[in-house]
Image (cartoon, rainbow, N blue to C red):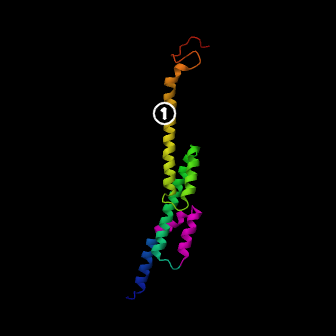
């Protein structure tokens, strides 16, 4: 290994600092989620890990933080469909114990089916009156409403 002079050391440190800037930003953005920040801090404080491993950990924790926000948004959407929210929470608790599906996939599945549930309910509401109007108990009996008898 050749020894590098003082200029080479300064240049090496400058390039390393420039390369570190995006990963430092990733680590700072990860601070939004305290449970993700803990993992980054523990990995960065460990003196046995390489610089590349630390950078990779900061990047993946940022990706996981973004995934957490998407999951939170999906959970908020599932508040509109409480029957699906109960199922999603149950599946998340079951999947937490070492399953292949991540929370994003589980919540995406339930959001998709809650959307389909809403479409089916809307279709039912729109279709039902057309064939049941003739059996209504009030005088209209499905006939067009005219101005007579209304007062």
Badge 1: residue crowd in 10 Å (few <14, some 14–19, many ≥20)? few
Nearer to us in this view, 94 or 21: 94
Percent coordinates x, y for residue 27 in the rendering: 52, 67
In the rendered image, residue 38 lying in the magenta stretch gets the answer yes
Q: Position of residue 102 (x, y in %)?
A: 50, 58
Residue 42 lies in the magenta stretch: yes
Q: Nearer the viewer, residue 114 or 94?
A: 94
Residue 97, percent from left and from top: 55, 61
Describe the element under mark 1 as helix, strand or loop: helix
Residue displayed at 42% across by 79% down = 12
Of the 4 image quadrants, the one containing the N terminus is bottom left
From what the image shows, is residue 63 above or below residue 140? Answer: below
Quadrant of the image for the C terminus? Answer: top right
Q: Along the line of sight, which residue is nearer the eye, 91 or 125? A: 91
Vertical comparison of 82 with 132: above or below: below
Residue furthest left in the image = 2
Pick out the residue farthest to the top.
148
Residue at the right extreme of this rendering: 151
| Residue that badge 1 annotates | 123
**Residue at point 44%, 81% (across, down):** 10
Residue shown at 59% from the left, 17% from the top = 138
Would you place residue 17 above or below residue 86 in this image?
below
Residue 58 rendering spot, x and y as whole percentages: 50, 68
| Residue stretch rendered in magenta on the structure | 21-46
Main SS, magenta residues: helix
Quadrant housing residue 136: top right
Number of numbered tags placed on the structure image: 1
């Amino acid at each position: 290994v050749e020894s590098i002079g003082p200029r080479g050391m300064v240049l090496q440190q400058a390039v390393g600092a420039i390369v570190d800037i995006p990963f430092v930003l990733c680590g700072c953005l990860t601070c939004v989620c305290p449970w993700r920040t803990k993992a980054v801090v523990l990995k960065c404080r460990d003196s046995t890990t390489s610089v590349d491993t630390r950078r990779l950990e900061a990047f993946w924790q940022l990706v996981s933080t973004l995934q957490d926000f998407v999951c939170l948004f999906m959970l908020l959407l599932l508040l509109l469909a409480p029957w699906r929210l109960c199922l999603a929470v149950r599946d998340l608790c079951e999947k937490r114990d070492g399953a292949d599906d991540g929370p994003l996939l589980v919540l995406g599945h339930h959001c998709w089916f809650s959307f389909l549930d809403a479409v089916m309910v809307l279709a039912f509401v729109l279709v039902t009156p057309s064939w049941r109007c003739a059996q209504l108990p009030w005088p209209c009996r499905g006939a067009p409403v005219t101005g007579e008898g209304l007062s």
